[in-house]
Image (cartoon, grey):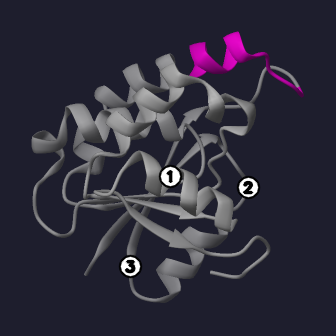
């Protein structure tokens, strides 16, 4: 049986993708970095601190990722960093793969520092980035040829 872990920033009432995979025979676990958001909108500084804390928490939960398919809809940067830095502790077989969904950089995509960090993070053949627009596909492909990129148009079903 294939094992899947879904990672969200916050605890949620439902996990439609996890439920879908469970119905297809996957053994599904759920992981949330935080209980609930501190406010409706977060500043860039708060988001950066949240990613750092999520990274540190995930380091202590590395066994959760071992030889599993990971589907991430929150704390994508911290999870990509964990997969990059601790790739040998997560497992090296074909069952250890990271799928990134609902990831946007918006205006930061033009920043050279962000481009360099993203290029480093995406230089990993065990990551699949699910993009929702053709321009995202082109942007991320320009940063890394190694990363798998899939195009799933916005509002499409799994």
Magenta-drawn stretch contains 119 = no
Residue 101 visible here: no
Q: Are marks 1 and 2 in contact (CB under 8 Å)?
A: no
Q: Magenta: predominant secondary structure element? A: helix
Q: Earlier in the sequence, mark 3 or mark 1?
A: 3
Q: Mark 2 = which residue?
A: 13
Q: Give the CA separation, mark 1 to mark 2.
A: 31 Å
Q: CA distance from mark 3 to mark 1?
A: 29 Å
Q: Quadrant of the C terminus?
A: bottom right
Q: Secondary structure at mark 3?
A: loop
Span highlighted in magenta in the image: 40-50
The answer to which image quadrant residue 34 occupies is top right
Q: CA distance from mark 2 to mark 3?
A: 20 Å
Percent x, y for residue 3? 31, 69
Kindly identify which residue carries mark 3: 26
Q: Which residue is mark 1?
A: 140
Q: Is residue 88 above or below residue 72?
A: above
Q: Residues within 10 Å of mark 2 (few under 14, many from 20)?
A: few
């Amino acid at each position: 049986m294939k094992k899947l872990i879904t990672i969200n920033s916050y605890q949620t009432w439902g996990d439609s993708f996890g439920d879908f995979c469970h119905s297809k025979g996957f053994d599904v676990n759920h992981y949330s970095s935080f209980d609930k958001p501190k406010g409706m909108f977060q500043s860039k500084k708060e988001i950066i601190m949240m990613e750092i804390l999520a990274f540190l928490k995930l380091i202590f939960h590395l066994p959760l990722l071992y030889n599993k398919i990971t589907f991430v809809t929150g704390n994508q940067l911290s999870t990509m960093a964990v997969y990059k830095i601790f790739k040998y502790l997560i497992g090296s077989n074909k069952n250890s793969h990271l799928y990134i969904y609902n990831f946007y950089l918006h205006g930061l995509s033009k920043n050279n520092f962000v481009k360099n960090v993203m290029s480093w993070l995406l230089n990993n053949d065990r990551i699949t980035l699910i993009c929702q627009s053709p321009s995202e596909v082109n942007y991320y492909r320009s940063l890394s040829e190694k990363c798998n990129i899939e195009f799933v148009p916005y509002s499409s079903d799994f």
